[in-house]
Image (cartoon, helix red, strand yellow):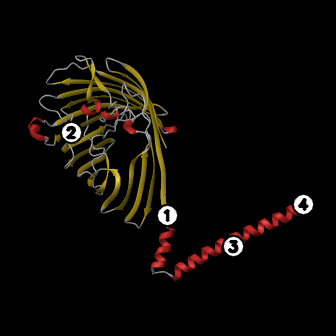
Amino acid sequence: MRKIISSAAIIAGVLMVAQASQAATVEERLEALEQKLEGTDGGNFLKAAKKKVDVTLYGQVNKAVLFADDGEDDDVFFLDNDISGTRFGIKAKAKINDEFSAGAQLEAEWQQNSSNKVDMNTQSSDEDAKKRQMKVYLQSKTAGKLTLGHGSTASDGIAEIDISGTKIAGSSHMKAQGGNFKFWDDDNDAYTGGITVGSIFDHLDGGSRKDGLRYDSPTFFGVTISGGVAEDNFNDLAIRYANNFSGTKVSAGLGYTYAGAGSSTHNTLSGSASVMLPFGLSFTVAAGEKEFDDQGSSAANYDDGSYIYGKVGYQLKAFSLGSTSFSVDYGEYDDMKAGNSLTAQYEGSTYGLQFVQKADAINTEFYLAYRLYELDDNVIGTDYDDLTLIWSGARFKF
């Protein structure tokens, strides 16, 4: 028996040596072939084949429980926080030379009971994964970055710049915070038809994500300029700035969008800015205006929509597990609903309180937030009940 084992061990050792020798021989042959083909297309191909492509898998899960009270009814919802929803993706990047690199990104969002889709009549919504990013790019250190495919437009995120540390709990993105909820009309004892939180509290954040072509300039002294064209006759421009002055962090952006035929809105101008002082106090603002497209003979009756939003926050290191952030915000929204006219003009206002606790060791943020929505009709004077939302949840990143 021992002889059999010994013989097997000897045979295995010989095979391993033979395989190692064979691998070395193949490598030597490739190197020899590359030397012979040096300066030819074949040699360049072999070199390109040996280049490394860096691939990164990433994602996050963001779940919350929401309590809603519209003055007529109240309910509890278990949902996905649409401010920054559950998603996963892959990034790939390859260096061409010291000047150029190329890459691609695939990203999908997979939300269950999204916070912008539930309401008093919709407790749950089953959703399939949907595309967020499907794009390729070519980048030059001196000339900038050119991106083709489905992804963020140049002005995407321009109204959501917020370095307070509480963005995940409450931000200028009101549509993500109960955007499908309706207001209760006390005069008629009914919900307000097509008037939802999302239709009144619009933060005009560019074009989100579309299929198109986008260019981003190199960053000079903290300034980056972006522009693009996309499907549905969409065009936009944006300028962003980010810097740090002796511990004072500054981030800001301004974007312009133009949507051609087929869109109810032609011109939109919006932006935001956020500043955090060295001792943790922060200030965030966002504002915008949109011009509605002419719509038939009543075009003169359509007013431009506008809004302004502000937040004051404070961040400290109260616990060793991570930073603790608090904030309070307020926003006013006028004539933002498409189709506003002399017979239907709406004003909305909102107040919010946010708390976020980071746990750095597990890359997680725990949050708690309160929001109140108020709606007024400037023409008819309908009495709408306020909408109250309280939610708490956690976002885990990987």
Q: Can you identify the residue that label 3 sits on? A: 21
Query: Of discs 1 and 2, which sits in the foreground?
Result: 2
Residues tagged 3 and 2 counted as in contact (Cβ below 8 A): no
Q: Secondary structure at mark 4?
A: helix
Q: Nearer the viewer, residue 255 or 100?
A: 255
Q: Secondary structure at mark 2?
A: strand
Q: Real-space Cα distance between discs 3 and 2?
A: 69 Å
Quarter occupied by residue 78:
top left
Residues tagged 4 and 2 counted as in contact (Cβ below 8 A): no
Mark 1 and mark 2 lie on one chain; the one further toward the N terminus is 1
Q: Can you identify the residue that label 2 sits on? A: 288
At label 3, the amino acid type is: Ser
Q: Real-space Cα distance between discs 1 and 4?
A: 47 Å
Q: Residue at x 43, y 64 (%)?
A: 95
Q: Secondary structure at mark 3?
A: helix
Query: Where 174 sits versus 52, above or below?
Result: above
Within-10-Å neighbours for mark 1: few <14, some 14–19, many 20+ = few
Q: Real-space Cα distance between discs 4 and 2?
A: 84 Å
At label 4, the amino acid type is: Arg
Mark 3 and mark 4 lie on one chain; the one further toward the N terminus is 4
Residue 43, horizontal then vertical, whole percent? 48, 77
Mark 4 and mark 2 lie on one chain; the one further toward the N terminus is 4
At label 1, the amino acid type is: Lys
Q: Is residue 229 left or right of residue 15?
A: left
Q: Can you identify the residue that label 1 sits on? A: 52
Residues tagged 3 and 1 counted as in contact (Cβ below 8 A): no
Quarter occupied by residue 383:
top left
